[in-house]
Image (cartoon, helix red, strand yellow):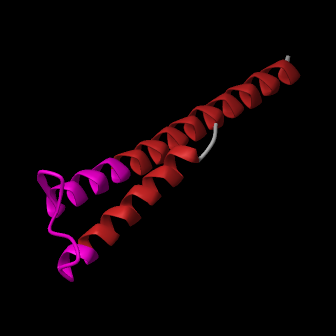
Amino acid sequence: MTRAGRFAGYGLMAAAALLAVAARRGLIDSIGPFPVAAVALLIGMIGVMLVFTDLMVRGLYAQVDAAKGKQAADEDGQEKGE
């Protein structure tokens, strides 16, 4: 399992921040037919979604691994007790 999704999310959030700064300084008015604020919000939202999804999946896998470890320890303890 790689962290590429999370790093892509961080990149999209940074791009959204750069777009917001450029719009604030008046360097960009629109991107095609869309206003810069809408594009920055969309890109930032996708980035945040990627980062949080990656973190939640990693947390879920950590919980599953911990439960498997505890179950294996319990089974080893029962076998030794017999």
Vertical position of residue 62 compared to residue 80: above or below: below
Q: Is residue 34 magenta?
A: yes
Horizontal side of residue 19 vs 7, given as left or right: left
Residue at 13% across, 53% down = 34
Residue 74, horizontal then vertical, whole percent: 72, 27
Q: Is residue 12 above or below residue 55?
A: below
Majority secondary structure in the magenta region: helix
Chain part drawn in magenta: 21-48
- The percent position of residue 62, horizontal first and vertical second, equals 59, 40
Quadrant of the drawing holding the C terminus: top right
Question: Is residue 19 on the magenta stretch?
Answer: no
Q: For this view, does 46 lie left or right of residue 51?
A: left
Q: Residue furthest toward the front?
A: 32
Image quarter of residue 77? top right
Q: Residue at x 42, y 42 (%)?
A: 53
Work out whether 79 lies above or below 60: above
Residue 1 picture quarter: top right
Between 54 and 23, the one nearer to me in the picture:
23
Q: Position of residue 24 (x, y in %)?
A: 19, 79
Instruction: Please report the residue visible at 20 percent of the width from the left and 73 percent of the height from the top.
Output: 23
Q: Horizontally, is 72 left or right of 39 in the view?
A: right
In the rendered image, the residue lying farthest to the bottom is 25
